[in-house]
Amino acid sequence: MPDPRFFDSLGPASLSELARAGAAELADAALGDRQIAHVAPLDAADVEAITFFSDVKRKDAAAATRAGACFVRPEHRDFLPPTCAALITRHPQAAWAAAAARLHAPRRHEPASSAVHADAGLEEGVLLSPSAAIGPGARVGRGTRIGPGAVIGPGVIIGRDCLIGPNAVIGFALIGDRVSISAGAVIGEAGFGAAAGPRGMVDLPQLGRVVIQDNVTIGANSCVDRGAFADTTIGENTKIDNLVHVAHNVRIGRNCVLAAFTGISGSTTVGDGVAFGGKAGVADHLNIGSGASIGAAASVFKDVPKGETWTGFPARPLKRWLRETAWLSRRAGGRVTRGDE
């Protein structure tokens, strides 16, 4: 379930209430009083959770789910196990989003007489600029410096000897030691997720966290989104340039380098020691193998094997891209330099 340091629980709620909230029909009205405490994905749900099923490719996960209830399209109802109550709707994800809003609420800054909330905890030796704000339940380790205008949200944990730059905003995050987050960076805001509902597009809940390990550097005006349900993670000693976007559920390994304007789409996994040139882009749900290199302005739409160098649009192995570029240049009648052959 969502981390209580960052999300307030508003449950439980009955299936009848959640069906109304999601504009769904409870298949077995006798189950209307069943109580649901939280939302969860199919494969992580327990008997107190409500989930959704909308992709037939995940029918095995649907059949194995332990969820107490599931929003599902009428034609997919039989994929659910008999222990899981079916809530019938043409828009399962949108209905689930409505249930999530009923059961969970992100913690936000509360009005306080001081910029540092009384429930926040700062170890000895924290250097805090007067205009910085620290929310309830936040913890900041010894020797960390927090710049002017920085905002540390409720429940955030920041380790020792970190540097938080001016106007950085950090929420829903667990941060290790010796981490540097530069001016204007935003850590832990909601990732981009939307689904069609009966009245148009609706935002999907982003109920995960950001986990940043020791010795990470994040450049100015970069954004690291919190997970949709799982965590967004950045491994030890990874260095991120200015104006980089890391989307929800992304997992980046240790000792990676991401140059400016790189964008990593949601649920992509990046191994250890991967290097991204400036303006590189990676599509969602991919795997970038350890030791791989992605050239500047490359657009990656396929998994990249371990240790390979890819570039181009769409990205492909470097030697193949060089051969194709040389061939195209010859076909176009242009001159080919020795290095292009």
Image (spheres, rainbow, N blue to C red):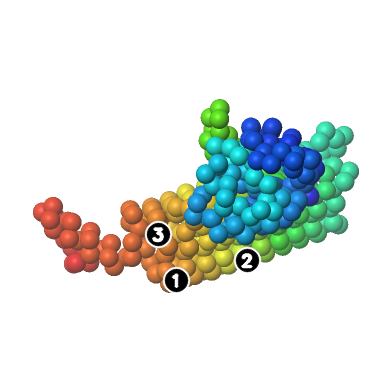
Horizontally, residue 176 falls left or right of residue 126, namely left
Label 2 vs 3, first from the N-terminus: 2
What residue is drawn where x is 64% and y is 45%? 86
Horizontally, residue 87 falls left or right of residue 36, namely left
What residue is drawn where x is 43% and y is 58%? 277
Please name the amino acid that badge 2 sits on: Glu
> Rounded to the nearest whole Å, what is the CA distance between mark 1 and mark 3?
13 Å
Residue 306 tag number:
1
Label 1: which secondary element: loop
Measured from the top left, where is residue 261 in percent x and y?
47, 49
User: On screen, 201 above or below 336?
Assistant: above
What residue is drawn where x is 40% and y is 55%? 301
Task: Tell me if I can see residue 80 in this picture.
Answer: yes
Residue 236 tag number:
2
Measured from the top left, where is residue 311 in percent x and y?
35, 60
Measured from the top left, where is residue 177 in percent x and y?
72, 62
